[in-house]
Amino acid sequence: MTKKTIYLDHAATTAVDKKVLREMMPYFSDKYGNASSIHSFGQEAAQAVEKARMQVANFFGANLNEIIFTSGATESNNLAIKGVDKAYFKKEKKKPHIITTTFEHHCVLETVKKMEKENLIEATFINPKKDGVIDVRDIKNAIKPNTILVSVMYVNNEIGTVQPISEIGRMIKSKNSEQGTGDKKIIFHTDATQAVNYFDCNVEKLGVDLLSMSAHKIYGPKGVGALYVKFGLDIAKIQDGGAQEFGLRAGTINTPGIVGLGSAIKEVKSQKSKVKSMVVLRDYLINKILKEIPDSRLNGSRIKRSPNNVNVNFSRVEGESLLMMLSAEGVFASTGSACSSGSLSPSHVLLSLGLKPEETHGSLRLTLGKNTTKKEIDYVVKVIKKTVEKLRKVSGNVLKDYYKNMKHKA
Ligand code: PMP
């Protein structure tokens, strides 16, 4: 008998939807032309890419020439931040100031930290409040005369909290109009990777100039994503080569991947009706865990929360051991983001909420998908409860000593 497996790690990645896969298939080995080739074989691929561009542009309420295909959200975020800085420096020959948050995905955080270390920029990192939500006033107060970019994620990938993007957008718009029509405008970027499935991503409504997304979080393929770039924005390319993607992103166009992205984003629209039932299921899971497992706590706001995210902390439990034992039982979850697993350092997201390192370690992220059922949730809670009890028996005291030692060393 094959073992029952339950996948609750949809924030890490999702399965490619069968319909999406079917649309992608011809572009691997039948219609394999290079979309930049002039001959009709290449043009057939180019047409498929342009259809996908239209699907993506429609979803974000953007124009066709405002969508740049990339290899995923990591690249989109790098291009957004480094590209804006590069264009500014070329023109002004001055060090700009960038505002971001302390709980961004590593691909934003490390990019900004590295640029700061290399003396290319000045940077301010805003902490969220205890509930995992950024206060717009904190961003406003951090603005300096040389601020050129504000980058705030839409939905946090670990704790699922939703940020007030359109409010920040309005605040930046009014700051920019106070400053008149001068050259220097504050540019607003959001990493919407975890938001696309569930939230309104219309770029006009959000008031963003740049928006990053990734296909593999929306039942599309891995290794492809997009960056929305508002028309006329000053941004420079960050890798050299061909003139693909309006000269902003060199490299042969990933036709099957892009077709998959277009197809997946079209499906998101038709899935929107399922969001309400996911919220019900999420709340059922939260309530069941908090009720049935003693000393458990929800990380991040209960209300301003993505429909698919449950992030709970179990005191006196080591998160990595919990994950491994759950995996042995066929339950696939995560502690922090998948990108930081393998490192036992406390989650930067949980630390940003003001938790102590010892309060971060017993955290578990369960992220639901479009096919998650109540029956699966019931089974998962039963397994978690049993596993937490077991771990508390064997490791509670060991952990206490470990943290006592850590404090002495600090
Ligand atoms: N930003 C966020 C918020 C994410 O969740 C992820 C994926 N974990 C990324 C960026 C990176 O996306 P990709 O895997 O497409 O590079």
Image (tube, rainbow, N blue to C red):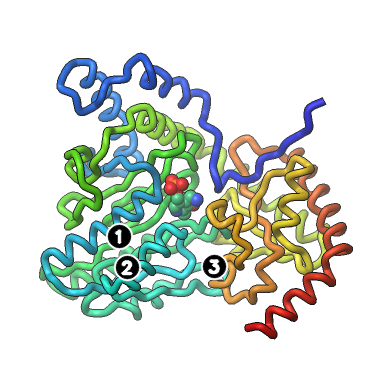
Residue position marked by numbered label 1 in the rendering: 81
The residue lying at 41 percent from left, 63 percent from top is: 110
Gap in angstroms between the C-alphas marked 3 and 2: 19 Å
Residue annotated with mark 2:
115
Q: Quadrant of residue 244?
A: top left
Which callout, 3 or 2, points to the residue nearer the camera?
2
Q: Secondary structure at mark 3?
A: helix
| Label 3 crowd (10 A; few <14 / some 14-19 / many >=20) | some
Q: Which residue is tagged 3?
A: 348
Examine the image and state in which quarter residue 10 appears: top right
Q: Is mark 1 within 8 Å of ligand 1?
A: no
First of labels 1, 2 by sequence position = 1
**Residue 131 visible somewhere in the drawing:** yes
Describe the element under mark 1 as helix, strand or loop: helix
- The mark nearer the N terminus, 3 or 2, is 2
Above or below, 385 relative to 66: below
- Quadrant placement of the C terminus: bottom right
Q: Position of residue 243 (x, y in %)?
A: 17, 39
Above or below for 179 versus 31: below
Look at label 2 and name its amino acid.
Answer: Met
Residue at image point 30% right, 62% down: 188
Of 299 and 201, the residue lying toward us = 299
Q: Circles 1 and 2: CB distance less than 8 Å?
A: yes
Mark 1 or 2: in front is 2
